[in-house]
Image (spheres, helix red, strand yellow):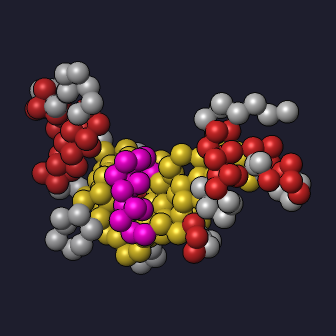
Amino acid sequence: MYTPSHFQMDDAAALALVQDRPFATLVSLGDGGLLSTPLPMLLDRDAADGPRLVGHIARANPHWRQFDPAVPSLAIFQGGDGYVSPNWYPSKAAHHKVVPTWNYRAVHVHGRLSVVETPETLLDIVRRLTDRFETEQPVPWHVSDAPADYIAANLRGIVGLALTIDRVEGKAKLSQNRDEADRAGVRAGLAGVLEVP
């Protein structure tokens, strides 16, 4: 990812975005070209072979059978984003040397993809994903709330994936290259409180 230094996120900030916005697009090289699958992936900092991302996909999805394990895969995470109008810059009135752009945050996690099929490990991934997203519910649902045989049958229909992290690239393009007045104009414009002529 092209990232000028003033837009670069450090690893801690990038991984914080991954934890906060865990819905990713996983991209791998396959037999016939690129494979792409959207899925939630959780950061596992305590894995024996180093930090990794874990998630699962449907067993019917060919991604898990066709990816090349010798070629790194890429998980793409998106933060907030939005169009930036030149009308939001106070500097437009002074010199008109402004153009439209797009502000966004994105993290690319590169690593080695592997398949997880052991029932215990797959159940752990499902529990962790469920616990992560149910915590905000008034009455959180737990995997143990469903009959064990029903969960076991559902586990047979999915495959776990683990992406062992080799490299993290984070980019936060948030008008850092503009002066404070223009940045304030962008914040107001994105918040929908600025009247534009």
Above or below: residue 91 compared with residue 49 = above
Image coords of residue 81 (percent x, y): 59, 46
Vertical comparison of 51 with 95: above or below: below
Res. 140 image quadrant: top left
| Residue range corresponding to the magenta coloring | 10-25
Q: Is residue 103 left or right of residue 119?
A: right
Quadrant where the C terminus sits is: top right
- Residue under the image location 42 percent in, 62 percent down: 14
Left/right placement of residue 7 relative to residue 74 reads right
**Residue 24: x and y, percent?**
45, 51
Quadrant for the N terminus in the image: bottom right
Q: Is residue 173 magenta?
A: no
Dominant SS of magenta comes to helix
Does residue 25 show up?
Answer: no
In this view, the residue in front, 10 or 22, is 10
Depth check: give the residue in front, 50 or 29: 50
Q: Residue drawn 54% across and 46% down?
A: 80
